[in-house]
Image (cartoon, grey):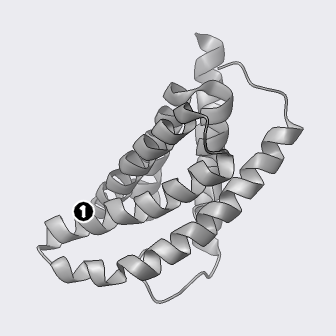
Amino acid sequence: MANRVSMYGILVALAFIASYIEVLIPFNFHVPGMKLGLANIIVLLAMYTGGLRAGITVSVIRIILVGFTFGNPYSAIYGLSGGILSFGVMAVLKRTDYFGIVGVSIAGGVTHNIGQLFCAMVLLNLPAVFSYLSYLMFIGVITGALMGIIGDEILKRIVKLKI
């Protein structure tokens, strides 16, 4: 139990640092709140080395911490809506063993954007936010693929963690 808790702590810290690095990178494509998704690399590593429970734990704790540290309660809500939806899709795809880590990551990137847009539509009562959907899907595919490739390369180089 102590080993699992300490590993979760390390993974959450790594994801938090990745999110902080992302805040420092001037990545602006004129879409509010758009990010690269660097922390998704850590969530993928947690999923593929420690299982789905490790992945969802790291993802949710990181989103809450980042939302309140670098944002506000609304950014935490948007992050959770995208994060939970994307994690659910990634978990289903991972279990099928049909998609590799890159495909799982791409699906996660796209569905994260869809979850956040749906949340914005509900909170703001503004269906027009879905006008960003095609653009965000394109960016989600690119960043998801990039994060998946990086995650795959890291997985090839580390010893499987026992979480």
| Direction bottom: furthest residue | 30
Apparent side of residue 72 relative to residue 62 in the rendered image (left or right): left
Apparent side of residue 11 relative to residue 152 in the rendered image (left or right): left
Q: Residue 129's image quarter?
A: bottom left
Q: Nearer the viewer, residue 40 or 61?
A: 40
x%, y% of residue 87?
Answer: 45, 44
Q: Nearer the viewer, residue 33 or 155?
A: 155
Task: Tell me if residue 131 comes above or below residue 91 in the rendering.
Answer: below
The residue depicted at 67 percent of the width and 59 percent of the height is 147
x%, y% of residue 27?
Answer: 60, 81
> How many numbered marks does the figure carry?
1
Q: Nearer the viewer, residue 125 or 103?
A: 103
x%, y% of residue 123?
Answer: 16, 66
Name the residue beneath numbered marker 1: 119
Task: Tell me if residue 113 comes above or below residue 48 in the rendering.
Answer: below
Would you say residue 34 is visible in this rendering?
no
SS at circle 1: helix
The residue depicted at 52 percent of the width and 68 percent of the height is 140
Task: Tell me if residue 13 comes above or below residue 54 in the rendering.
Answer: below
Look at the image and tell me in which quarter the C terminus lies.
top right
Q: Residues within 10 Å of mark 1 (few under 14, many from 20)?
A: some
| Direction right: furthest residue | 157
The residue depicted at 63 percent of the width and 73 percent of the height is 24
- Mark 1: which amino acid? Cys
Would you say residue 49 is visible in this rendering?
yes
Look at the image and tell me in which quarter the N terminus lies.
top right
x%, y% of residue 65?
Answer: 45, 48
Apparent side of residue 91 relative to residue 149 in the rendered image (left or right): left
